[in-house]
Image (cartoon, helix red, strand yellow):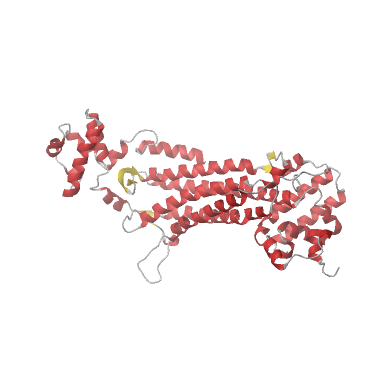
Amino acid sequence: MSDRNETSNVMWGGRFQKPPHVAVQALNASIHFDKRLAFVDIAGSIAHARMLFRQGIIAQDDAERIIAGLQAVRAEIECGELTFREDLEDVHMNIEHRLTELIGAAGGRLHTGRSRNDQVALDMHLYLREQVDAIHEEIRVFERVLLDVAEANLDVIIPGYTHLQRAQPVLFAHHLLAYVWMFERDCERLRDARKRIDALPLGAGALAGTTFAIDRAAVAEELGFEHIYENSMDAVSDRDYILETLAALSLFMVHLSRLSEELILWNSTEFGFIELDDAFTTGSSIMPQKKNPDVAELARGKAGRVFGHLTGLLTVCKGLPLAYNKDLQEDKEGVFDALDTVHLLLAVFPAMISTMGVNRERIKRALDGDYSAATDMADYLVRKGLPFRQAHEVVGRIVNVSIRERRALTAWSIEALRKESPLFDEDVLEKLSPEAVVNARRSRGGTARDRVVEQLTLARARVG
């Protein structure tokens, strides 16, 4: 008929007598974002073609021509010669169409025993497996940088905060190690998500399996999958593994955003604990003195972007009946962007952390005269027999006077302290220095220097 064209024949065959409306074609098209799946799509198709031949479903000559043709298509993509067509909707049809152009009718036999539903699921599993492995190693590189900076600053004591109020002094290394352990949990979550990624969906067909005598186990072995989906409907509709990956990336971004917030604070004039290198800051278009921590601010902002992709896909999946629905096309752009965001940040943060300056003198001055040794003064009285609540009250009065008179705790005379409690002796003042306060916290996981050295050793063994 006159209203039929190449596109309608290529895409849907004889069932449709009209091509899609131009707006529908644009709505359906995913090639502008799923073309990044081209190489894993070809790898999956080659494994599928080999299996079809081994099972006697297609002839050896057809299999060889298909595999050679797919390799030729891959070479065209690698050198930028293949132009992807939006009227062919997605990466799968673009590759199959080009394959058929190159080898003729044999190209049409590649799709035997599979559907685009299990094909795209396979592509996403293959792609995410590669990406999760890469991000896992990038986080490990970042952890090693944090460990190096922590070890290089083992003698630096900084104020520790709760409620953003001075709490107790801690080693700077101890503070950085807190993030190493956060990022190590992120690595654990990615490894755990990978267990679900590492499952073969191919062979599920559109939703019910296939009538052809395919060998799913052989395809799984060739593509390196540990598991095979045992239910065909689950195989084509499952996006849990993508949601798990987005959840793991979101938690990573929570941790990176918290670190970014502290870098921003520490880099400010008010704190002045660190100075970020010029290469990782920007200036102002109007204020010449400015040196803005834009990298850390962008990371803090991009956390919400990744969270949004997780929320978006959860919303897509929550009301879908089995099995495949076109809504699931929305699984790609969000996770692609989340992966790109994390890759980009992990390319810059290790260099930014390794080049930042630590202003030791400024940090030391910040500790002089503060009241972060108050807990140790109370603990001193407890060791002398005073119940902690009473000791807390005594030291609270001392701090109150100190604040009014702008007097450091170490500036009190023993006589004045004994008026507050007769339990104070000469040795109390030597226990109030930042070094003494830090090294007194020798419980496992504490900030005492030898405990932090233990942490470093343990963390390096974990990180590798």
Does 70 appear above or below 440?
below
The answer to whether 351 appears left or right of 206 in the picture is: left
Q: Residue at x 68, y 39 (%)?
A: 227
Judging depth in this view, the residue of 375 and 103 nearest the camera is 375
Judging depth in this view, the residue of 300 and 145 nearest the camera is 300
Location of residue 416 in the rendering, given as x and y in whole percent from the top left corner: 13, 39
Can residue 234 be spotted in the picture? yes
Which residue appears farthest toward the top when viewing the image? 385
Q: Residue at x 33, y 36 (%)?
A: 441
Does 445 appear above or below 205?
above
Q: Quadrant of the N terminus?
A: bottom right
The answer to whether 260 appears left or right of 80 in the picture is: left
Location of residue 292 in the rendering, given as x and y in whole percent from the top left corner: 40, 62
Q: Residue at x 65, y 60 (%)?
A: 33
Location of residue 353 in the rendering, given as x and y in whole percent from the top left corner: 44, 53
Does 206 appear above or below 10?
above
Q: Residue at x 70, y 62 (%)?
A: 79
The answer to whether 219 appears left or right of 197 in the picture is: right
Q: Quadrant of residue 39?
A: bottom right
Can residue 83 be spotted in the picture? no
Which residue appears farthest toward the bottom when viewing the image? 286
Please state the total of marks drawn on the protein image: 0
Location of residue 111 in the rendering, given as x and y in whole percent from the top left corner: 80, 52
